[in-house]
C-alpha cells in the first residue's frame, strides 16, 4: 500500500492555497468606508459650549493698540495708534516699547503679568488673514508675550447679567 504525501495526480499545488487578492480588495473597501464614516461621526457629536459672552480686557497705558486693514492692491496697512507704520517700523517700535518698559520697572527681573505690555490688534472684518498674521508674528518676534484681538461683542438684546 503506497502512501502519497504530495498532491494527487493531476492536482495542482496552488489550488490548496488561499487567494488573497479578493481579501485585500474587501479590506481596502472597508478601510475607505471606515475613514469616511469616522469623519461624519466626528462632526456630528453634540456638545454644549460654555455660555461666556466675552471677557473684557482692561486697557493699561503700556499696552500697544494696533489697527490692521487691507490696503490698496492687496497690500496691508498697519497703524500703531493712529500712525501708519511698515513691518520694519512696527518691529522697531515694538522692541523699543519693551526696552522702555524694562527700564521703567527696573530690569527684566522685575517684569511680571501686571506690568508686561500687551499688543491689542483691531482687524477689519474684511482684512486678509495674512495681514493680521504678519502683525502677530512681528509682535511676537519683538518679544511680546501676549497678543490679543479686540472685537465688537454682539448686542445685549435678551441678555441679563446676573
Image (cartoon, grey):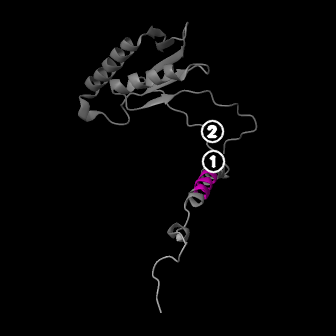
- Can I make out residue 162 in this image? yes
* Residue 52 in picture, x, y percent from top left: 61, 42
* Residue 76 in picture, x, y percent from top left: 50, 13
Furthest residue in direction bottom, as rendered: 1
Q: Which residues are magenta?
A: 25-33
Residue ID at (54%, 61%): 20
Which corner quadrant of the image does residue 136 belong to? Answer: top left
Secondary structure beneath disc 1? loop
Query: On the image, numbered disc 1 is attached to which residue?
Result: 49
* Residue 74 in picture, x, y percent from top left: 54, 11
Residue ID at (63%, 49%): 36
Secondary structure beneath disc 2? loop
User: How many C-alpha atoms fall within 10 Å of the one at disc 1: few (<14), some, or many (≥20)?
Assistant: few
Residue ID at (23%, 29%): 107
- All told, the count of numbered labels is 2
Magenta stretch encompasses residue 118: no
Label 2 vs label 1, nearer the camera:
1
| Circle on res. 53 | 2
Viewer-nearest residue: 156 or 149: 149
Decide: is 37 above or below 130: below
The image quadrant where one finds the C terminus is top right
Furthest residue in direction right, as rendered: 158
Evaluate if marks 2 and 1 touch, with contact meaning CB atoms under 8 Å apart: no
Most frequent secondary structure within the magenta stretch: helix
Residue ID at (60%, 59%): 22
Decide: is 26 above or below 61: below
| Spatial CA span between label 2 and label 1 | 11 Å
User: How many C-alpha atoms fall within 10 Å of the one at disc 2: few (<14), some, or many (≥20)?
Assistant: few
Amino acid at each position: 500500500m503506497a502512501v502519497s504525501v504530495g498532491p494527487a495526480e493531476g492536482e495542482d499545488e496552488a489550488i490548496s492555497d488561499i487567494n488573497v487578492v479578493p481579501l485585500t480588495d474587501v479590506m481596502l473597501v472597508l478601510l475607505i468606508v471606515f475613514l469616511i464614516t469616522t469623519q461624519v461621526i466626528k462632526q456630528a457629536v453634540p456638545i454644549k459650549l460654555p455660555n461666556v459672552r466675552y471677557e473684557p480686557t482692561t486697557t493699561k497705558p503700556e499696552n500697544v493698540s494696533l489697527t490692521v486693514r487691507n490696503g490698496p492692491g492687496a497690500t496691508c496697512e498697519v497703524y500703531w495708534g493712529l500712525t501708519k507704520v511698515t513691518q520694519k517700523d512696527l518691529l522697531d517700535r515694538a522692541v523699543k516699547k519693551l526696552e522702555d518698559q524694562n527700564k521703567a520697572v527696573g530690569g527684566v527681573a522685575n517684569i511680571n503679568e501686571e506690568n508686561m505690555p500687551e499688543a491689542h490688534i483691531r482687524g477689519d472684518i474684511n482684512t486678509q488673514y495674512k495681514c493680521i498674521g504678519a502683525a502677530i508674528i512681528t509682535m511676537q518676534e519683538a518679544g511680546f508675550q501676549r497678543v490679543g484681538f479686540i472685537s465688537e461683542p454682539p448686542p445685549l438684546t435678551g441678555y441679563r447679567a446676573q
